[in-house]
Image (cartoon, grey):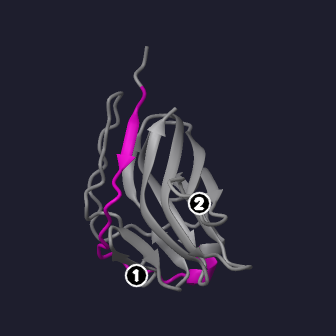
Amino acid sequence: MKTPVALILAATLTLVGCQDKSADADAAAADTTAAVPAPAEIPAPVTSSASLIRVIGQDELPSEPGVGIVADGKISSTGKAGYLVYGPYAALDAGTYQVVLDGTVEALPEGAHATVDMVSNQGNSKLGSAEITGAPAAGAPLATFVATVPANATDVEVRVIVSETARVSVSGYRVQSQ
């Protein structure tokens, strides 16, 4: 019997440098299938196995420049549309995964949107997604969804995409085999 693969992504975030994205941020926020350019230095993907537990280090969740600011163990949107969080370009075996995003919503006015998705193949293969629809109840996750990895992947990333008027903070996320 195969043991489930678990990928746990840490909650303590610190912004790291990444390439400036020349694409229009509003278009990127509206098109959740758009590829996200990789940061200047991407750690080599880990080899996926039946006992994988990966913690994305305390300083490794990149944000598109100007879209997020790190404080108090979370990354918060600044009013610029784009990728609040992306990465880690990790390896995952084929299978079904539960994705849980932790954080808060300060404001999500009419017309604003925030989405979390899991992608591979340089952002070209969407594996699952969920809209962030409002502030979660105390202790509840910001969003939860199921993602399907159809074949072993080496560049899986979880992205949080926000519009200009969305005020969202992310404290972390988990990806666990179902």
Q: Which residue is mark 1?
A: 65
Q: Residue at x 52, y 59 (%)?
A: 123
Question: Up-down: is 50 above or below 24?
Answer: above
The quadrant of the image that shows the N terminus is top left
**Identity, as a three-letter code, of the amino acid under mark 1:** Pro
Q: Nearer the viewer, mark 1 or mark 2?
A: 2
Secondary structure mostly taken by the magenta-highlighted segment of the chain: loop
The image quarter in which residue 28 lies: bottom right
Q: Are marks 1 and 2 in contact (CB under 8 Å)?
A: no
Q: Position of residue 46 (x, y in %)?
A: 29, 44
The image quarter in which residue 91 lies: top left
**Identity, as a three-letter code, of the amino acid under mark 2:** Pro
Q: Secondary structure at mark 1?
A: loop
> How many residues crowd around disc 1 within 10 Å: few (fewer than 14), some, or many (20 or more)?
some
The image quarter in which residue 17 lies: bottom left
Decide if residue 63 is in sight here: no
Question: Up-down: is 56 above or below 81?
Answer: above
Q: Earlier in the sequence, mark 1 or mark 2?
A: 1
Q: Residue at x 53, y 77 (%)?
A: 82
Q: Is residue 23 magenta?
A: yes
Q: Is residue 22 magenta?
A: yes
Task: Please name whichever residue, 82 or 165, is drawn nearer the observer in this view of the structure.
Answer: 165
Q: Position of residue 114 (x, y in %)?
A: 61, 69
Q: Position of residue 72 (x, y in %)?
A: 32, 72
Q: Residue furthest right?
A: 110
Q: Residue furthest front?
A: 138
Q: Which residues are magenta?
A: 4-28
Q: Which residue is mark 2?
A: 136
